[in-house]
Amino acid sequence: MFYKPISLREAIENVNSTWFLPAIQRPYDWGERHRKEEFIYSLFDSILREYPIGTLIVWETDKEIPYRPFLSDFDSKKLTKIMDKGCWGKKDKCLVYDGQQRLQSIFSGLKFTFHDKVLCYNLLFDRHSRREAKGFKFFAKQSDPDVGYIRLNEIYSCNTKQLAEFEDKIISNLKETIESFDKKQELVAKDNLKQLWKLLVEKDTKILSYYPLQSDLAEKEVLDVFKRINTTGMQLTNSEILFSEIKRVNFDFEERIWEASLKIKKETRGFSISPDSILQIIFLLVKGTIRVDLRRVKDSDLQTFITTWSDLEAPLRSFFTDFLYREFKITHEKIINVKQALIPLIAYFYYMQTMQNTKFRDFSVKSIQNMKKYLIHSQLLYWNLQSQIDNFHKTIKKVCQRKDATFPFQQLKNMVDSKKRYGELEADRDVDDSSQRWFVLKMLTPTTQFSFQGDPDEKFNPEIDHIFPLTPDSSIKLPRKYSDYVDTIWNLQPVKGEINNYKRQKMPQEFFSEHSQYLKDYSFLPTTDTKNEIWSVSSFKEFLEVRKKKILTFIKSSYGINVKA
């Protein structure tokens, strides 16, 4: 069997017609959202320059294999559903085992949208004199792109007989919209149009190739090929390989985890936990370690992973919705820096459900208090080593086998090596940790809901205000090292962007004397009497010291935690 050349248009015509994705395929993943856009620009730039863009591997089979279609309008929140079992035996289907990322990007870029944006190309970009991938750009769906840009889906939707008519229309439009449109620009635009037409509309240029696997292979043999592939794209992680193995036994295993992840995000108003992280938790519950090690997995374990997930889903969702969200209004993962430290808490929810038949609403007051203590200590002291998480899990599992299954915070704390100062909290070292500011501010305002996304529901979309500004008006005489003193947690307050923007660099005494209505948005103030001397510039150290004591008192009264001042 040899590689077969294919044009871009032929490949896209095959997508969701005869080419589909096997259920074992990992979800589309080319980095974070904006990194995805950069990858797509580079991919399409390579296409336009007729560079090689790799080979696809497809398996044409009429065997009853579960599969899903490609996405049309791409959105990282979406995952297409597995086709109904009645379609699995489709006679002319080809399952794509390598090339999903490229095909999905090209498919959405040429025919649909990507995060509600349309891929466009700047016809005035001289690709012959510039080698960087700067000609492509995304614009909002239904919006007018910048002058000179053309939608790729507009070109792709044409047929081969329309070139002359289409070119005349585009060039005439450029002449009307660009006053200084000269002959050189016209030549560049026409050259780009012809190249785009050649690659997106015509079928003569075979820029892609694919390798068809033998149709008589067994599914397990094809899966082995899938795991061995390392020619292009992103190499499979251990989690992705494990997902593929489990899906061989239970085809919609990852799909159910993905759906649970989206439900958690909806129920918490934004907190996102990835399917890979959930698989890591399952691995811990089954194998006793968070390190996904394929050497420890036997075929006989696969069903155990499936059963464990069935038992874990409800406790997992309860942890995020009943504890993180309802107790602390944590709505976004950026608040939690030490994410692995959450896993022992999740394990406790799981074992309380499976061993004690106890849901969160029936947890003891002491357990909930201990869980809060653990959350704060584990985040601020960075309890995220694999050995720590594994040992915490082991202790929690043993505790949950007893009648008194109170969350064992003190035991876990005692297990931490005190010589590495991981056991006790100190105010200026741990609470005032610049990388933990959102977490600390959330602990200090547990009833306030932060929203770090768009704010259509007018939720509190916070910014951090320095009460005594970092860089006040230059006319104000400041003590030496002023900025070092005020850039601390004791001087910070999460506020609405409108307040922060309005306050800007004004000293607090001046601002609040003029706008006392905003005092209610600030907590732990020494006094609301802005005429008091403590509000003056000269007393800023005293102001912050009083606020520090109030914050530490709040932590003790709310969470039962003594922080060393």
Image (cartoon, rainbow, N blue to C red):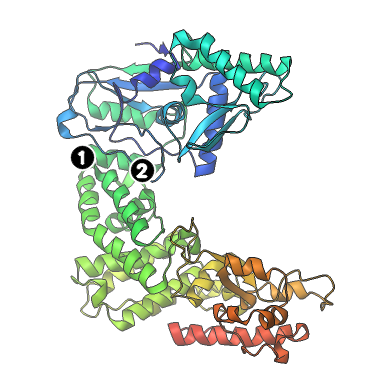
Q: What amino acid is labelled 1 in the image?
A: Val
Q: What amino acid is labelled 2 in the image?
A: Lys
C-alpha gap between disc 1 and disc 2: 23 Å
How many numbered tags mark residues here?
Answer: 2
Furthest-front residue in this view? 176
The location of residue 546, given as percent across then percent down, is: 63, 88
Looking at the image, which residue is at 21% across and 29% down?
A: 65
Q: Which mark is residue 249?
A: 1
Q: Establish if 245 lies above or below 217.
A: below
Quadrant where the N terminus sits is top left
Q: What residue is pinned by disc 2?
A: 78
Looking at the image, which residue is at 43% across and 72% down?
A: 375
Residue 506 is left or right of residue 28, and the answer is: right
Q: Quadrant of residue 58?
A: top left
Question: What element does badge 2 sit on?
Answer: loop
Within-10-Å neighbours for mark 1: few <14, some 14–19, many 20+: few
Q: Nearer the viewer, mark 1 or mark 2?
A: 2
Look at the image and tell me whether residue 213 can be seen: yes
The location of residue 112, given as percent across then percent down, is: 42, 31
Furthest-left residue in this view? 86
Q: Quadrant of residue 78?
A: top left
